Amino acid sequence: MPTVAIERTALFTHLGRTYTDAEFDELCFEFGVELDEITSEREEATKSSTEVIYKIDVPANRYDLLCIEGISRSLRVFLGDMEAPTYQIVSPTEEASSTMTVVQSSTATIRPFVVCAILRDVTFDEARYKSFIELQDQLHRNLCRQRTLVAIGTHDLDSVKGPFKYDARSPKDIRFVPLTHTEEQREFDGASLMECYETDANCKHLKPYVPIIKNSPLRITLNTKNVFIECTATDLTKANIVLDTVVAMFSEYAAVPFSVEPVTVNYVNDDNSIVKSYVTPQMYTRKETTSVKFVNSLIGIDVDPEPMAELCNKIQLGPARLLPAPSEEEGPILEVTVPPTRSDILHAVDIAEDIAVAYGYNNIVKTVPKTCTVGGEQPLNHLGDLLREEIGRAGYVEVLTHGLCSIKDNFTALGRPVTAAVSLSNPANVEYQVVRTTLLPGLLKTLQHNKSMSFTGGFKLFEISDVVLPDDKHVVTETIVGAKNARRVCATYAGPTSGFEVIHGLVDRIMTLCEVAPEEEYVASSGNKTNKLVHCKEGWAYTIRELKAGESDVSGTYFPGRAAEILLTSPKGGHRVVVGTFGILHPNVLENFDINYPTSAVELDLESLL
């Protein structure tokens, strides 16, 4: 959750009220935020001032609460001291400044989107200026993902003339004086600036970010009256949210409060003809609906439709109105008005959550559930937990590996053909291309990165986790998911010898623990005339058979003639089903994963054993 630091005196001035620390803590709870810490500037930065600082934790999706203006405004509306503001887009004062031209061919592959707005006749003082900068920093850290999705730029409109042009140029063709060197008026091109940011000790704080550089004459000062805001982005939706948030927070300081001038953004191709155009900021006010019955049932209250519509005014979702009931069973429909600052309202559940805040958490009566239920682990999870303990007692070390892997590790390196798998459309790198369909690559890479361990007595690893398999027949809530999870256990033994008998013994141990009896032929083949008396589930039995080359997609993983399939007979199927494989890994597989010792492995489906 983002934490917003606000001076107590300034906050109470905005609210027009004063509170004790305990009273304000209670107000924050009622509003749905948390007063995390009360400190002072002296404690924060060893300053002489002892101004009390409130550190308030706000929900991660409430971007309108990231500054003192947003918090104080929301609290005043919540307390009934003011009505929610109405934002208006006014006609541009001058046409030239209200146009942004985007060179599509050069920006399309870098940061293809830009949105803009103009705030006229803004009055800044030191506190407002500081808040203006801090809001941008908060947005950059949260919604903008350290400027990778959106980067905000603010400029003194009186120091520059439109129309404006958004273009991407070679670093050597860009020359400017960055804000970090305004006093010495040192000019850089793009390449030399990047080098400076990498080496200059005074610029270390800028290295993790994509720098937003503004020419010195354009920077915002306390004397700035007209502000030009532009946001370049890789995500147009987030760019509009960021721009609407900045405009909504600081348009209250304009000569006409809560007004903003639009900017027309034109995309042009190489022959300078317009191919796309839109106007920003959007400042959309939209309507969302939910049923009164749904809200009451979700919160656990019983509020009549008319009072519920009035509650919406406290949370800036008004004016709300009641629509005729589509059916007698569903009851009346509540239609709320969502302002441009509330991009977090996406579903009827979000409306119900805010109505619960307006109603008051402390006013919700605690009730005993009408049904009596007993919680417990899912059978599959319980089985996995029990097996973890037993396999650990057998000398195996449990690992937890990443659920994503490369196509090479999941298929090619294991000697398997590339088959269908759930893939990522935009993987961060080659290591995260598909969701794994087998647990084996994770264990083998763990062996690869632990060569310094002693393999003299054998190195045993195991993992119990999920793989994801394509499955077009897996249907949930009438929607084809196209994939399903499968819980598996996988173990490896690496040492001076192959350890085939060790892995074979683990297979028998797992089956015994799951109360599955070996078939008589399997017992006889081991040299024993009878099986030891152990409790087994009726109708359950298992055996193994040789896994021959070419019979299965996984046969290429194992050394020919030294691998087997695990066959299970259960009352559910009535016939033998392959539930796993084990054997000595093929030398080519070991070479692909850079493993220096013979290794045996087993992979078994756990869901079949329930």
Image (tube, rainbow, N blue to C red):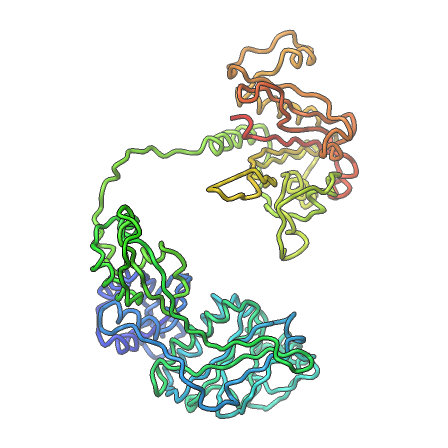
Q: Residue at x 55, y 31 (%)?
A: 392
**Relative to residue 380, is residue 595 depicted above or below?**
below
**Relative to residue 388, is residue 277 depicted above or below?**
below
Quadrant containing the N terminus in the rendered view: bottom left
Image-quadrant location for residue 216? bottom right
* Number of numbered discs on residues: 0
Image-quadrant location for residue 111? bottom right
Q: Residue at x 46, y 71 (%)?
A: 242
Where in the figure is residue 121, as x and y percent of width and height? 39, 89
In the picture, measured across the screen, residue 363 lies left or right of residue 52, that is left
In the picture, measured across the screen, residue 153 lies left or right of residue 106, that is left
| Depth order, front residue of 562/323 | 323
Does the rendering let one see residue 452? Answer: no
Q: Residue at the top extreme?
A: 529
Where in the figure is residue 179, as x and y percent of width and height? 55, 84
Q: Residue at x 28, y 50 (%)?
A: 299
Q: Residue at x 54, y 44 (%)?
A: 481
**Relative to residue 7, is residue 417 depicted above or below?**
above
Does the rendering let one see residue 145? Answer: yes
Where in the figure is residue 45, as x and y percent of width and height? 41, 74
| Depth order, front residue of 282/522 | 282
Where in the figure is residue 429, as x and y percent of width and height? 66, 56
